[in-house]
Amino acid sequence: MASARALCPPLLLLLAAAGAALAKLPLPPYVRPCSFKLSDRKLSECALKSARDIWPNILKGDPKYKVPVLDPMHLDRLVVIDGKGPLGMQLIARDVKMYGLPDAIINSTTHRSNPQDNTYVATIPLVHITAKYNVSGRILLLPIVGQGNVVMDLKNVKLVYQFDFRLEKLEDGETYYIPLPGARLDLDVDGMTIKMDNLFNGDGALLDTTNNFLNEEWREVFDSLRPSFAKAISEVITDILNGIFRQVPFKDAFLDVDAV
Ligand SMILES: *[C@@H]1O[C@H](CO)[C@@H](O)[C@H](O)[C@H]1NC(C)=O
Ligand SMILES: *[C@@H]1O[C@H](CO)[C@@H](O)[C@H](O)[C@H]1NC(C)=O
């Protein structure tokens, strides 16, 4: 413990430095900049075109801009269901892979020169998820502890991502467009299926009954996992925005910024 505490001050310094300018980079070649002089409506239209152009280009990730691989999107660990909800079970997933992001349709964007309420609305026809799970608690009133593989399909996933930004001069003297932490993500689906293997040590009948129950009650299952999924996805989107906008000065990320 003592040695961990001794490590703290330098670590804090490091974090503070990470909050400053990262590295001054040019705009990635696949990003078409929009003019900040445009009306909010035109800026939103331009941002929509730009976002649609950018999407296929970042699916494989772009380490230089800290954009993670999105096809599939990978999460090390996700507390899928925290055990506090009506389902009475805790579901922890590791090595989570989400497929289907290349098919995302970006429906609309609202981009304003005003820092509040910038949004992206997108729909993904099918998100296929594979993971390793640990479950504990109760299912169908039966006590359960187990681990295995889980596969989920989410149909017509609708995302509304809403963020605020701030223009901020960082240590290098440049002004940056900084997406603020605390973005909101609304998430909904038209349907979902879930299949867990190896429940009740692979007892076939109980396993089928449980999977059937989870699929019949998918709305409740989805509502239970919505907060953790929304938080994880929102963090990935915020990371992408930060990876680009914290490294590309405002004047290079947009056109006509002198007018601001
Ligand atoms: C987004 O666009 C797709 C394709 O046009 C459509 O199927 C979907 O319903 C739209 N979603 C929203 C939220 O408007
Ligand atoms: C589940 O729990 C076991 C034992 O605690 C652990 O070894 C394993 O890594 C856990 N698996 C997941 C997916 O969390």
Image (cartoon, rainbow, N blue to C red):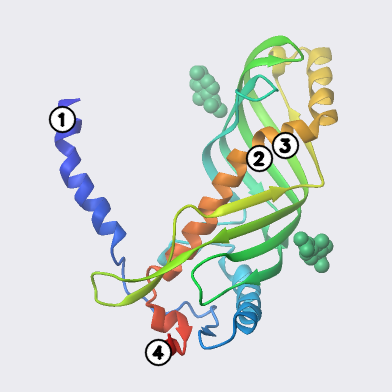
Label 4 SS: helix
Q: Nearer the viewer, mark 4 or mark 3?
A: 4
- Going from N to C along the chain, the mark reached first, 1 or 3, is 1
Task: Report how far apart the C-alphas of labels 4 and 3 lie in the structure.
Answer: 46 Å
- Going from N to C along the chain, the mark reached first, 2 or 4, is 2
The residue singled out by tag 2 in the image is 226
Q: Nearer the viewer, residue 83 or 96?
A: 83
Q: What kind of residue is marked 3?
A: Phe
Measured as percent of width and height from the top left, residue 83 is found at 60, 23
Task: Report how far apart the C-alphas of labels 3 and 2 lie in the structure.
Answer: 6 Å
Which residue is found at the position 73% from the left and 61% from the top? 103
Label 1 neighbour load within 10 Å: few <14, some 14-19, many 20+: few
- Residue 194 in view of the camera: no
| Badge number at residue 258 | 4
- 179 to 201, vertically: above or below: below
Q: What kind of residue is marked 2?
A: Arg
Measured as percent of width and height from the top left, residue 17 is found at 24, 58
Q: Nearer the viewer, residue 257 or 30?
A: 257
Label 2 SS: helix
Label 1 SS: helix
Queried on whether the Cβ of the residue with tag 3 lies below 8 angstroms from ligand 1, the answer reads no
The residue singled out by tag 3 in the image is 222
Which quadrant is home to the N terminus? Answer: top left
Which quadrant is home to the C terminus? Answer: bottom left
| Badge number at residue 3 | 1
| Marks 2 and 4 in Cβ contact (< 8 Å) | no
